[in-house]
Image: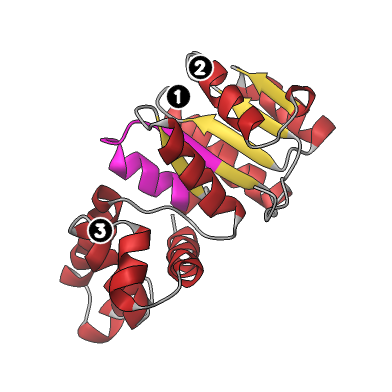
Amino acid sequence: MGELTLPVPIMMIEDPPTFKHRLEMILMGLGYPTELMISTQNLAEAEALLQQHLPNLIFIDLELNSPAKLRFIKQLKQIHPDSYVIAILTEQYTALLFDAIRSGAQGYVFHHHTEAEMINNIKSILRGGAPLHHNLAQYILSRQTKYSENKSELEEKTVLALTSIEYKILNLVSVGLNSQQVADQTNIPLYKIEGNIKNTYRKIASLEH
């Protein structure tokens, strides 16, 4: 982890906090001291802690009270745009994950992830990239199709204004490849693959709500 600058402090917003201990252990393994980790189950308290501590890395569990938490992410990114927001949820909530990215989240970890998978996702985000799994890739592509059904051909191309490589990455991931396998197949460095995924996230975040 020495190649990365660790953003501090960290805030974890979980209700109930069943995932907290596991996440704390993983973050400690990445070099984070426990005294720089703040946790709460309450959004009002989270807003106060945000003002007091300006955390640079925020984990937020979206499975309960998700509309309010999505609003919180959007407001947080307006107040503190350089912070990293990582959504915590279950893989089947793909539409909710898309909405989190649209609100400003830079990535995600799933409740069922192994320690290695969580570390890979967190490292990708801290390197300036973003994770992408097949369900999310399929969902993004399906949203493009749904939008295009109600728009002209010219407008279809500007829905997310995806580049050819961004489309290629989405299509390759949608059939089950991971970011490293996409890099190997396309002969594009992994950091560029992750950067293109992050650009796709930015375009999702720019969509009108």
Q: Is residue 79 on the magenta stretch?
A: no
Q: Which of marks 1 and 2 is nearer the N terminus?
A: 2
| Mark drawn on residue 65 | 1
- SS state under label 3: loop
Residue holding disc 3: 177
| Residue 45, picture quadrant | top right
Which amino acid is tagged 1?
A: Asn
Q: Is residue 67 left or right of residue 53?
A: left
Front label number (1 vs 2): 2
Q: Is residue 177 left or right of residue 37?
A: left
Query: Can residue 193 be seen in the rendering of this structure?
Result: yes
Which amino acid is tagged 3?
A: Leu
Q: Which of marks 3 and 1 is nearer the N terminus?
A: 1
Measuring from the top left, give residue 18's x and y in whole percent. Answer: 48, 14
Magenta residues span: 86-101
| Mark drawn on residue 15 | 2
Query: Can residue 104 be seen in the rendering of this structure?
Result: no
Measuring from the top left, give residue 91's x and y in whole percent. Answer: 30, 36
Q: Classify 186 as above or below 95.
A: below
Q: Do the residues labelled 1 and 2 touch (CB within 8 Å)?
A: yes
- SS state under label 2: loop
Who's the residue at 38% across and 77% down the image?
161
